[in-house]
Image (tube, coloured by chain):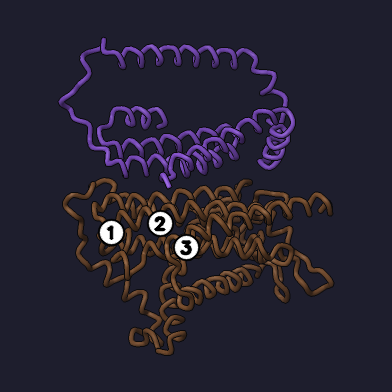
Amino acid sequence: MIPVYVAQLGMVLAVFVMLLLSAAVMVYSERKVAAFIQQRYGPYLVGPRGLLQPIADVIKLMFKEPLRPVAADKAIFFLAPILSATAAFAAFAVVPFGAESTFFGLLDEPIKLQVADVNVAVLVVFAITSISVYGIVLAGWSSNSKYSLLGALRSASQMISYELSYGMALAGALVLAGSLSLTDIVNAQQGAWFGFIPRWFVFVQPLGFVIFMIAGVAETNRAPFDFPEAEQELVAGYHTEYSSTAFMMFFLAEYINMVTAAAVAANLFLGGWHGPFLPEYLGWIWFLVKVAAILFFYIWMRWTLPRLRYDQLMQFGWKVLLPLAALNLIVTAAGVIYFGN
Amino acid sequence: MAVGASLLVVLGRNPMHSVLLLIVSFAALAAIYIGLEAPFAAVVQIIIYAGAIMVLFLFVVMLLNAHREDDAAPPAGVTSGPLRAGGVLAVLLVAELVWALRRAARGGDALLSAGPGADPAALQSVRALGNRLFTEYSLAFEVTSILIIVAMVGAVVLARRES
């Protein structure tokens, strides 16, 4: 009854709104979880249990005065946060979060719960995370300030170094599934061995999952790899000179990058929307649970582990993670050829 | 858009803007690849060219602090050296483009008509690409990898301090 393209437009809108809300939820949950880890309450004044805190944050940030250093390159200064935020949103466009559904017969034919089902979805995510490096580099450079430039350069080199391990861990899951499309990869993980151990890829290559998580944390500039934003050393790194809405854009981009990385990890390694006890069309609930678990893990890591020094960070990326990722890929490929999945 | 962005790369005065416009032109090329039913080539173009190589360019331009080009040194008319060489090259390239397009319109390459072009599923083409890369073109593949290793070793050697 409702034509498919209307449903697809609705899907685009729904995903966009969902991502914005998830950023708000992340802001709130980060502060609350941090507070509980540090044995204090966290925000509790605004709204019941502090739930309206993100809204208060947004309103405060929007009312601040937008600043721009005089010697900053106007065009690039303006462009950088937009690029960051756009790349963050775009990466989520190819991530599927549920099985095909017709929404209880409202639609003529089932549509996938995904903005675009591209056959090379995995590579698109990877490509767009490469682009998000630019937002940071351009922000740091165009601010025309020492702190920003240093923070930006550090961040960029960190991101491109860990991109390699990210890609190789990703390639491990890809080899297991035999397809580049995220939907196919998730569908290859349905079912269970012995009836109760789900066929998730995390059980087949745990090392790949660990490498992917570590590289994901490094890619999104989160602790313990958040040296580029190290408050103690660099004032605030690449977003020192930004204020108000632009600052909000950067934070939005960071949280959405986290959500995307968690969503891709859930799809690649944790079986996406498959899970026991729920019928297929409610699979997105399982997806949300898995993504939430991974995000909780991100926040937990940030407030538990000390920050890595920059040279330790780079050494770890190149000398430990990359060889491990390559080894993982070789072993996985050998296993697939030998066992003939 | 690709042509426009590339023109602006050369004609622009701020080297930082030129780098960014080059990235835009690569993105336009990727869009063209998608239109040619080669999504894999498009995505790989973004990952490698726009994602890695241009970051390198960006670092170089940023760290070497390239300033805006002065307008006080315009090329001395149409007969200046670089302009002449560039003009000749442009004419040659356009001629080659016209020749290639004519040839494609006349009947197409044997290579283009055979192969996985008929199959819309991207993975089939990725699989076929991998197949061909490792069988027919494996020499090119190996030579490229040797080239990359040589470049890396050279870079490390050049970057070492005299210890």
Tint of chain A:
brown
Q: Nearer the viewer, residue A160 or A295?
A: A160
Q: Which residue is mark 2?
A: A155
Q: Residue at x 35, y 13 (%)?
A: B85
**Helix, strand or loop status at disc 3:** helix
Q: Quadrant of residue A310?
A: bottom left
Tint of chain B:
purple
Q: Residue at x 70, y 31 (%)?
A: B138
Q: Chain of mark 3?
A: A
Mark 3 to mark 2 CA distance (whole Å): 14 Å
Mark linked to residue A147:
1
Viewer-nearest of discs 1 and 3: 3
Viewer-nearest of discs 3 and 2: 3
Q: Mark yes or no: residue A17 visible.
A: no
Q: Residue at x 22, y 31 (%)?
A: B69
Mark 1 to mark 3 CA distance (whole Å): 20 Å
**Of pointers 1 and 3, the one earlier in the residue sequence:** 1
Q: Amino acid at mark 1?
A: Tyr
**Helix, strand or loop status at disc 1:** helix
